Amino acid sequence: GNSVTQMEGPVTLSEEAFLTINCTYTATGYPSLFWYVQYPGEGLQLLLKATKADDKGSNKGFEATYRKETTSFHLEKGSVQVSDSAVYFCALSEGLASGSRLTFGEGTQLTVNP
Amino acid sequence: EPEVTQTPSHQVTQMGQEVILRCVPISNHLYFYWYRQILGQKVEFLVSFYNNEISEKSEIFDDQFSVERPDGSNFTLKIRSTKLEDSAMYFCASRARSTYEQYFGPGTRLTVT
């Protein structure tokens, strides 16, 4: 079956530091890949996506590149802010079929200190 | 911007009681989902729904669970006889045709005592 593995957390950074959160996946087909963010007390918000190999998703200064050869989709940001403190989830979905469940990683708690 | 809404935001119930969690998906979306997140754990898929029937369900979604789209706007999750281990945050999500992205509601926190 499909699975997503994220780097163990939590991650604590100072403001303006560089962020990497690692994500690797196992899938039987050619999945689409996503990063979702969950701010304290809120639901899941789609941060970015990539639907095929070598695609780069980007949003709000965050980027992730779909690497089929390493089955990875690492999240990066060049300069984090305090407001980026949240839990980040990597997820995959196998195509557009009516089921198309999302399979999530464990989540990585990011805390950014001033 | 359209969004998925869920009610109530928090539901407290006693073990053995029935609960219904409600969701209003984004209006032009056709695919609907329920997920749950037990405190401190990963988000888990429960069920997907399309064209008024279940498309796929996980092993978590046993006979105690059911889903329904009673009208053109609501999508509900019913738990017939709640257990302590059903305590979790329940998220509804929806997706448009021919797109990959699922949009999530804010969640309903279910506490079973």
Image: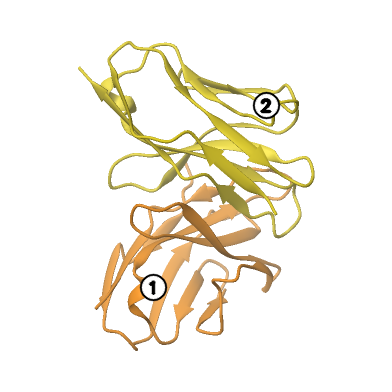
Report which quarter residue A86 is drawn in.
top left
Residue B70 seen in the figure: no
Q: Amino acid at mark 1?
A: Asp
**Which residue was labeled with disc 1?**
B86
Decide if residue B1 is in sight here. yes
Residue at left 33%, top 46%?
A: A42
Question: Which SS class for mark 1?
Answer: helix
Report the amino acid beneath label 2.
Tyr
Question: Going by the image, does A19 lie left or right of B103?
Answer: left
Colour of chain A, in one word, is yellow
Please give the label number shown on residue A66.
Answer: 2
Q: Nearer the viewer, residue B37 or B19?
A: B37
Q: Residues within 10 Å of mark 1 (few under 14, many from 20)?
A: some
Q: Nearer the viewer, residue A37 or A112?
A: A112
B50 sits left or right of B72 in the view: right
Q: CA distance from mark 2 to mark 1?
A: 35 Å
Residue at image position (46%, 79%) is B78
Give how far across and how far down residue B45 sits, in percent.
Answer: 55, 60
Q: Position of residue B88 (x, y in %)?
A: 36, 64
Residue at the image position 44 percent from the left and 11 percent from the top: A78
Report the chain holding disc 2. A
On the same chain, marks 2 and 1? The answer is no
**According to the image, what is the colour scheme of the structure?**
by chain
Image x and y of residue B12, in percent: 25, 74
Residue drawn at x 38%, y 35% is: A9
Which quadrant holds residue B112?
bottom left
Outermost residue on the front side: it is A8
Q: x and y percent of residue B52 in the render?
A: 67, 73
Colour of the chain lettered B: orange
**Dot 2: element:** loop
